[in-house]
Structure formats: structure tokens, C-alpha cells
Image (tube, rainbow, N blue to C red):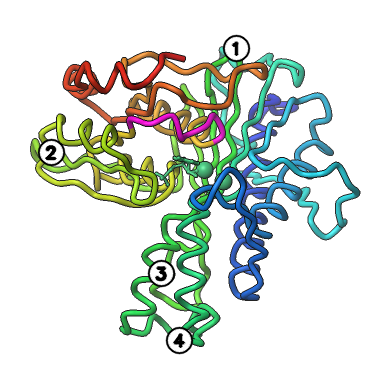
């Protein structure tokens, strides 16, 4: 590192520790069993105490360090004094030591927009919690994963949960951080749970092993809890060899970069900018692409509408194939952004 690191490097170095803190909050609320669930637009659109506390922690921590950056969080929360123990002010040295891509070297706080999904996969989080607490299990097991159905079902769902912090400049996602709070759950509560992945376009992505799906297999990943006929029609039109139905936009991008899925196909307006900003940046940093179902890019300026109205199509490669397979009937059902 020579001199003062560029703003974007300092922001990602902070967002990494801030996302880790949010992940710890998400685990703590699960273990307490008091989720404080609120239905937002309906039973499939939930908010928990973990969503609220994690967002407060992320937004307050980042805005204290970077007061002029616009930060947009998913949850609509009353403006109130944030408890001091929610503030995280660490930075990851190893990120500060990397060199900033030249095109982002001189960015100013006023030019950046941060999109925050404090807990992506809330539906799955609440289902996993219900499953654990109904069975009287309550906590992440201390000594490794019990082989019982309860644990397996609940923890598979918890793996869908991520914390997403995306950074946009000029309407494009340029950097992102994803924390997966329950990663390594198989090892039990004694092990260090969770992992953090990050990436900057032009620099690369870190915290995971980049892999492609072996062979020419088309493995499509899609929603498990927000499906309908248009969503299913579009998945089928891809002529997949296999379909995986899991929760979370962040989780599905992790599947793409780790070679577990070839395309994330979601022909629905349900995903929002905070769902796709961080995932898109990380995917782009490793050569992948995230667009609407027409193949057009989304924009992430502060004043855009939040809904990704024309669906989400993401791939590590062969994007054009998937765009070309989207049926006219599906395009007609969705509106371009
Ligand atoms: P899913 O793949 O169903 O987990 O959705 C990915 C992200 O989009 C999650 O944050 C969901 O909450 C959000 N989402 C997708 N569809 C809807 C919907 N119909 N209503 C509310 N949120 C949705
Ligand atoms: Mg989300
Ligand atoms: Mg969320």
C-alpha cells in the first residue's frame, strides 16, 4: 500500500467487518429464539429483529466512517439513536493493501451509493428457526451436526441466508461484500461459523474458490418460496438438466461462482436492487453477468426504483443462451425497467 488507500478500498475494507458483525447479529437472534417477525407486504415478505438490528448496525457503522455516501437499506426503520454496541469500526488490512483498479482510484463519497440487504433469505431464516425451536433444539448444536432430520432441514435453509452490501458508482455495481452467517454449520457451534466473500470489478473476487459447473450441464437455480407459473415456465424454457430451488439472491450467486449452478433464473419483479447489487458486483468481478430477462443491465443510482421489474437472469458464462431461451410470453408478463 502506498500512501492513503483509495476510498473504494477503505469502504470495502470496512464493509467486510461490518458484514461480519451483521452476520453475528443474525446468528445471535436465531439462537435467542425471539425473532420478532413482522409481515411487510404479505406472508411471503417478512422482517425479523435480525433484519432490523443488522440494518441498523450496517448503516450506522458505514455512515459514521463515510458520512457523505448515500446508503439505501431494505428495511423501512424509524430514525432513532443506534445503540453503541451495534457500531463496528474495524477495517480489513489485507484489503487496504490491495491496489485499487485505476478507474476507481479517485472516486468521492458523494458519487457512491451503497445498497444494503441486511438479511437476504428471511423466509428461510424464519422457517429454519421455527423448525429448530419447535423441536426444542433452539440453538446451533455445540458438538457438530446431529444427523437428525430436524437439524438437516433447518441448517440447509440457514445456508440460504446472507448479508449483502453492494457499492455502485455511475449506476453500475463496482464492489460487493457477501457474508454467509451459517457457513460451516456442519461443524457445530464450537467452530467458527460464517464466511465473507468480496469483490471489486477490475480486481477480482475473494473468499471462495471460483468454479464452473462441470461439462455442459445446465443447472438452473431459482426461488423456493416466491414461485408462480411465469417463473416456472421460464425455468422450463431453459431446458435444464437439473433445477435447484433455494432461498436468497446472494445464495444463488454463490452457487453460480462455486460451480453448483449454471444460471439463476427468476422471471418475477420480486427481487430488489439491494438483492442484486453486491451479488452482481462479485459475479462481474469474476467475468459473470446479471441482467433482466431481456438481457439488459439494471442501474443502481440513488433515485432508481427499487424493484427489478423485468426479472433476474445471472450466469458465469453462456449468458446469451439463457437470454435467447426466455419465451415471449414471459417477457410480456414482465415490464422492462
Ligand atoms: P428468493 O429467491 O425467493 O429467496 O428471492 C430472492 C430475494 O428477492 C429475497 O430477498 C426475497 O425476499 C425477494 N423476493 C423475491 N420475490 C419476492 C416477492 N414476491 N415478494 C417479496 N420479496 C420477494
Ligand atoms: Mg433479499
Ligand atoms: Mg432482506
Who's the residue at 29% across and 30% down the image?
315
User: Which region is colored magenta?
Assistant: 267-274
Of all residues, the one furthest to the right in this rendering is 81
Q: Quadrant of residue 164?
A: top right
Q: Secondary structure at mark 3?
A: helix
Q: CA distance from mark 2 to mark 4?
A: 39 Å
Which label is found at residue 143? 4
Question: Dot 1: few (<14), some (14–19), or many (≥20) neighbours within 10 Å?
Answer: few
Q: CA distance from mark 4 to mark 3?
A: 14 Å
Mark whose residue sits in front, 2 or 4: 2
Q: CB atoms at circles 2 and 4 under 8 Å apart?
A: no
Which label is found at residue 240? 2
Q: Closer to the N terminus: mark 3 or mark 2?
A: 3
Q: Can you say whether 49 is above or below 44 in the image? A: below
Q: CA distance from mark 3 to mark 1?
A: 38 Å
Q: Secondary structure at mark 4?
A: loop
Q: Closer to the N terminus: mark 1 or mark 4?
A: 4
Foreground residue among 102 and 282:
282
* Residue matched to label 3: 155
Q: CB atoms at circles 4 and 3 under 8 Å apart?
A: no
Question: In the rendered structure, does residue 271 fall within the stretch colored magenta?
Answer: yes
Mark whose residue sits in front, 4 or 3: 3
Who's the residue at 51% across and 29% down the image?
200
Q: Can you say whether 266 is above or below 174 in the image? A: below
Foreground residue among 75 and 45:
45
Q: Closer to the N terminus: mark 3 or mark 1?
A: 3
Who's the residue at 60% across and 28% down the image?
167
Amino acid at each position: 500500500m502506498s500512501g492513503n488507500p483509495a476510498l473504494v478500498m477503505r469502504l470495502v475494507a470496512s464493509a467486510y467487518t461490518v458484514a461480519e458483525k451483521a452476520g453475528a447479529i443474525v446468528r445471535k437472534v436465531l439462537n435467542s429464539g425471539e425473532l420478532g417477525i413482522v409481515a411487510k407486504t404479505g406472508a411471503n415478505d417478512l422482517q425479523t429483529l435480525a433484519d432490523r438490528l443488522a440494518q441498523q448496525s450496517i448503516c450506522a457503522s458505514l455512515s459514521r466512517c463515510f458520512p457523505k455516501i448515500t446508503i439505501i437499506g431494505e428495511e423501512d426503520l424509524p430514525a432513532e439513536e443506534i445503540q453503541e454496541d451495534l457500531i463496528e469500526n474495524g477495517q480489513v488490512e489485507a484489503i487496504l493493501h490491495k491496489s485499487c483498479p485505476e478507474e476507481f482510484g479517485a472516486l468521492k463519497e458523494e458519487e457512491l451509493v451503497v445498497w444494503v440487504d441486511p438479511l437476504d433469505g428471511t423466509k428461510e431464516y424464519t422457517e429454519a428457526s421455527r423448525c429448530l425451536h419447535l423441536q426444542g433444539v433452539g440453538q446451533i448444536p455445540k458438538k457438530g451436526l446431529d444427523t437428525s432430520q430436524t437439524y438437516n432441514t433447518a441448517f440447509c435453509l440457514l445456508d440460504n441466508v446472507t448479508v449483502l452490501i453492494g457499492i455502485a458508482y455511475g449506476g453500475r455495481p463496482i464492489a460487493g461484500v457477501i457474508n454467509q452467517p451459517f457457513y460451516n454449520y456442519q461443524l457445530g457451534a464450537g467452530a467458527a461459523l460464517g464466511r465473507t466473500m468480496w469483490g471489486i470489478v477490475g480486481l477480482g473476487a475473494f473468499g471462495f474458490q471460483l468454479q464452473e459447473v462441470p461439462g455442459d450441464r445446465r443447472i438452473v437455480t431459482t426461488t423456493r418460496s416466491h414461485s408462480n407459473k411465469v417463473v416456472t415456465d421460464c425455468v422450463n424454457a431453459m431446458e435444464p438438466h437439473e433445477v435447484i430451488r433455494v432461498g436468497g439472491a446472494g445464495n444463488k450467486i454463490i452457487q453460480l461462482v462455486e460451480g453448483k449452478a449454471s444460471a439463476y433464473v427468476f422471471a418475477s419483479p420480486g427481487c430488489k436492487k439491494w438483492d442484486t447489487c453486491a451479488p452482481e458486483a462479485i459475479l462481474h468481478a469474476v467475468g459473470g453477468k446479471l441482467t433482466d430477462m431481456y438481457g439488459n443491465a439494471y442501474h443502481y443510482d440513488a433515485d432508481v426504483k427499487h424493484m427489478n421489474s423485468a426479472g433476474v437472469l445471472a450466469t458465469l458464462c453462456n449468458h446469451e443462451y439463457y437470454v435467447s431461451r426466455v419465451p415471449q410470453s414471459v417477457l410480456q408478463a414482465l415490464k422492462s425497467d
